[in-house]
Image (tube, rainbow, N blue to C red):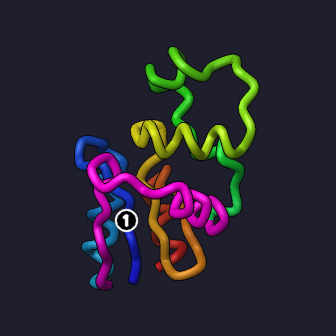
Amino acid sequence: MIKLYHNPRCKKSREGLAILEASGKDFEIIKYLEDIPSKSDIESILDKLKISPIDLVRTQEKIWKENFKGKTLSDSDLINALHEYPKLIERPIVVNENKAVIGRPPENIKGIL
């Protein structure tokens, strides 16, 4: 099952949703600000994206700037931050089996459908 980690207030996330709807494929929407991914979920997403935790962080968010910017953080620290403050998670993310993409730009999503 394809999963969309979605924030309805985000334009790019809504564009990603539209691409999935147009594909005609079944998918599940995970509103990750409400249904917060576990640390193991975040690790799994990172593995499928083939990126480091820092690459999933929205470094322009106020939470990041006030609490984490300029600090030396381990991957584990970053995963904990992403879990504790899901607003820091880059969006949208689409997971399809053992692959995933960040939908920035939203057209990236077409590559794993």
Please name the residue that numbered disc 1 is placed on.
4
Give the position of the N terminus as an image quadrant: bottom left
In this rendering, position of residue 104 left or right of residue 31:
right
Residue drawn at 62 percent across, 59 percent down: 46
- Is residue 28 rendered magenta in the image? yes
| Quarter of the view holding residue 40 | bottom right
Depicted 49 relative to depicted 110: above or below: above
Residue drawn at 25 percent across, 73 percent down: 21
Q: Nearer the viewer, residue 39 or 94?
A: 39
Residue 25, image x, y percentages: 32, 84
The tally of labels here is 1
Residue 30, image x, y percentages: 31, 62
- Is residue 36 rendered magenta in the image? yes
Chain part drawn in magenta:
25-48
Residue drawn at 33 percent across, 67 percent down: 19
Q: Nearer the viewer, residue 84 or 101?
A: 84
Residue 70, image x, y percentages: 69, 17
| Quarter of the view holding residue 11 | top left
Label 1: element kind: strand
The amino acid type, in three-letter code, at marker 1 is Leu
Within-10-Å neighbours for mark 1: few <14, some 14–19, many 20+: many
Residue 108, image x, y percentages: 51, 62
